Image (cartoon, rainbow, N blue to C red):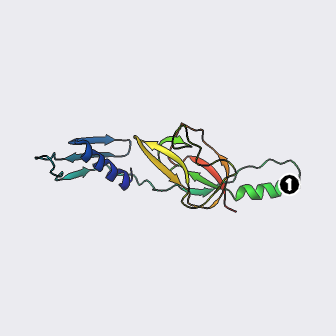
Amino acid sequence: MTINEIQDLIKFIAKAGVTEVEIEKKDFKITIKSEMPKKKGEVLSEATIQVPMPVAAVPSAPMVAAVPAPAPQPAADAAPKAAENADNYITVKSPMIGTFYRRSSPDKDPFVEVGNSVKVGDTLCVIEAMKLFNEIESELSGKIVKILVDDNSPVEYDQPLFLVDPS
């Protein structure tokens, strides 16, 4: 869980008037306690966070790494050129566990399609984790070569989502 997600959770708890929330995953446990306002209109006085187990660092943006994808070999001359292009693809990986969505809502167009050009900061997809929708933005400019995950399907941390040709 990132710091931003924890802060959003604290704000949500403050608005909802909940006094205590406890979230436990495999590698960490977080308990958020807050005091209720004594008078109407009074602001919450304190929120504390207890993390008894070590928190695994979760990157706030997608990880990217080169992926050597095997290329089809239609002819002997085309094989070296195709293999060279496949080595140049960058894999955009999931920064968290959750549900992968290609669009912001069912009636909207997908964020990206195969063949689309993307630039740094463009939204590639949304990953829902614990009812929070996290926009995954591109860390590089290039062209979407392949979408590796089906819409509305679960994804794991560090799972490849897209192949991007940065050239």
Q: Position of residue 62 (x, y in %)?
A: 52, 54
Can you see residue 122?
A: yes
Quadrant housing residue 133: top left
Q: Position of residue 136 (x, y in %)?
A: 51, 52
Kind of element beneath mark 1 = helix
Which of the image's four quarters has the C terminus? bottom right
**Camera-side residue: 39 or 75?**
39
Q: Note whether 57 is above or below 21 in the view shown.
A: below
Q: Amino acid at mark 1?
A: Ala
Farthest residue in the left direction? 38
> In the rendered view, does 4 fall on the left or right side of 83?
left
Q: Position of residue 109 (x, y in %)?
A: 59, 43
**Camera-side residue: 86 or 13?**
13
Which residue is pictured at 38% across the width and 42% down the height?
Answer: 26
Q: Note whether 150 is above or below 166 in the view shown.
A: above
**Camera-side residue: 10 or 160?**
10
Other-residue count near label 1 (Cα within 10 Å), few / some / many at <14 / 14–19 / ≥20: few
Which residue is pictured at 21% across the width and 51% down the height?
Answer: 47
Q: Note whether 136 is above or below 20 in the view shown.
A: below
Q: Position of residue 7 (x, y in %)?
A: 32, 53
Farthest residue in the right direction? 76
> In the rendered view, does 34 fall on the left or right side of 124?
left
Q: Which residue is mark 1?
A: 78
